[in-house]
Amino acid sequence: MFIMTNDRYNQGVLLDEYNGVYSLISAKQGDRKVFTQWCKPRVGEEKYSETAIPMGVRLGDRQQAITVLEKFVQGLKRGMAQTEADREEHQEYPKEESDIPF
């Protein structure tokens, strides 16, 4: 299931299932087809995987995915989204785009 989140660039999120594990994947809609976005995850301090994987987050099996998504909806309704201050406090990755090695 694909949900468009940005009409200008045809970007959105794809609910994907692979081997019983559900994931939310960053995707883009083309002509009658949805394309997943791929990335090479970090595997060390300055190393990246040679194998690309879909850019997303694993939610777990069907019941776990439902539970996780319901918790996000509850958090959104209560206004519990992470703030810019929270992100800066827990920053683990480069803050400037020029510091990103790809």
Image (cartoon, rainbow, N blue to C red):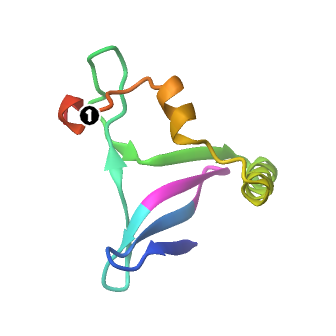
Question: Which image quarter is the C terminus in?
Answer: top left
Residue 48 coordinates in the image, percent (x, y): 29, 26
Identify the main secondary structure in magenta. strand
Which amino acid, mark 1? Glu
Q: Is residue 17 magenta?
A: yes
Residue at 26% from the left image edge and 17% from the top image edge: 46
Q: Is residue 10 magenta?
A: no
Question: Magenta residues, as a range?
Answer: 16-26
Residue 62 coordinates in the image, percent (x, y): 76, 54
Residue at 26% from the left image edge and 31% from the top image edge: 50
Quadrant of residue 60 in the image? top right
Is residue 39 shown left or right of residue 18? left
Q: Residue furthest bottom?
A: 32
Q: Which residue is mark 1?
A: 96
Q: Nearer the viewer, residue 89 or 16?
A: 89
Q: Is residue 90 visible?
A: no
Quadrant of residue 82 in the image? top right
